[in-house]
Image (cartoon, helix red, strand yellow):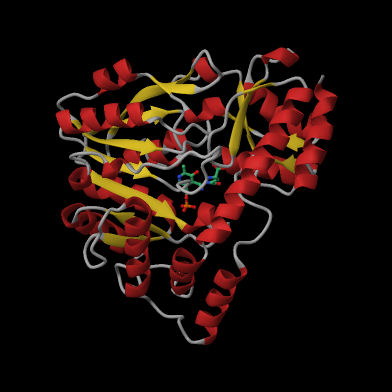
Amino acid sequence: LTSRLRPFTSTIFAEITELARKTGAVNLGQGFPDTDGPAGMLRAAQQAIADGVNQYPPGAGEPDLRAAISEHRQAHYGIEYDPDGEILVTVGATEAITASMLALLEPGDEVVLIEPYYDSYPVAVAMAGGVRRTVGLRQGPDHRFELDLDALRAAAGPRTRALVLNSPHNPTGTVLTDAELHAIAEVCREHDLIAITDEVYEHLLFDGRAHTPLATLPGMAERTVTISSVGKSFSATGWKIGWACGPAELIGAIRAAKQFLTFVGGAPFQPAVAHALRNELDWVRGLRDDLQRKRDRLSKGLTEAGLDVLASEGTYFICADVRPLGFTDGAELCRALPERVGVAAIPVQVFCDDPEPVRHLVRFAFCKQDEVLDEAIRRLHGLA
Ligand code: PMP
Ligand code: GLN
């Protein structure tokens, strides 16, 4: 293994999921739902297979899916993307992120990441020979995470080429405020950065919050690559259909990288995702409301089990401080938890260059059936 990749040999999700499997633990670690997406979408994929949509699709993705993505961004956010040239279908958001780095970074270029960061970002930067600069999203006094705006302004320098943003944010569940988004946009404009925004949780915001794509802020559309995917919005994390939208010059570059990573992917899923984007948004609103109730259910249960629960404003995830139960290190606890009480969770520190500020935090996924959440809570009472 090269020195570039040696720091990243195994993902925390694979490690904890394997531990959960071996011990029979309730898995609130890896974020995937345990119920299926909308029936019409599932039927559309079956129909596409029966209809012979089984060969390589066009390199940029099925034209009808690109049209549906364009309609979706127009309808929800009022932003226009030309399906021919400004939209690229990828193998999940993950490929869109990696292809973006490979396409847009020269070796030595710096990328600003907000930490805790999603685990694939630093690896994608490393694969492209880039250098990451991290800025903290830190626990504020009111149990909400806040972006350190001074650190953000200080992070961008002459070698900085791009910034990666993820809101709603995995693992904290934070939805960045308009003020935070405007501050990020200002830094991008001032330092002429490309913004790469990971919006896979764009429909999963709670308590009436609305999603604001960074690309809709002044001066940002021409420098922003917006990434999303089918996985979270439509409960189909295994389908791995994602997309990147942005100016033709950037999308063309990303397409050049993508064609030699996977060329294309998921032919019969593409018409099904087009169907979902056009016809299943009511279903998604139901999912969001369900997830909000599940967040409250797990939050209450974790609190009763003695943990100090932080706010979750969106995503599948909620974080809790484990110190009230006498633990100091979330990673140690998460490696022992499956054996000890039969629950799996993810330590937040693995998503950070500087683990200290979040050493005591553990992430729990609530995208699970109520019985599963209740059983996990029952077991977690054994920790006290
Ligand atoms: N970004 C974030 C923030 C995620 O939580 C995930 C995992 N669902 C991904 C990207 C990966 O998305 P996909 O499965 O579409 O590759
Ligand atoms: N995005 C999911 C999570 O954060 C899992 C993705 C993965 O397993 N790589 O839990």
**Spot occupied by residue 160 in the image (x, y as percentages of width and height):** 20, 30
- Evaluate whether residue 312 shows in this view: yes
**Spot occupied by residue 284 in the image (x, y as percentages of width and height):** 55, 56
Q: In which quadrant of this rendering is ligand 2 seen?
A: top right
**Spot occupied by residue 181 in the image (x, y as percentages of width and height):** 33, 32
> Which residue appears at 83% of the width and 26% of the height?
381
Q: Determine which quarter of the picture holds residue 249.
A: bottom left
Out of 362 and 287, give the one closest to the viewer.
287
- Evaluate whether residue 236 shows in this view: no
User: Quadrant location of the C terminus?
Assistant: top right
Up/down of 256 relative to 297, above or below? below
> Which residue appears at 78% of the width and 24% of the height?
304
Up/down of 47 relative to 373, above or below? below
Q: Residue farthest to the bottom?
A: 51
User: Quadrant location of the N terminus?
Assistant: top left
Up/down of 62 relative to 284, above or below? below
Q: Determine which quarter of the picture holds residue 328.
A: top right
**Spot occupied by residue 362 in the image (x, y as percentages of width and height):** 62, 27
Out of 367 and 329, give the one closest to the viewer.
367
Q: Determine which quarter of the picture holds residue 86.
A: bottom left
- The reply, left or right, for residue 363 in relation to residue 227 is right
- The reply, left or right, for residue 75 in relation to residue 301 is left
- The reply, left or right, for residue 340 in relation to residue 187 is right
> Which residue appears at 32% of the width and 19% of the height?
149
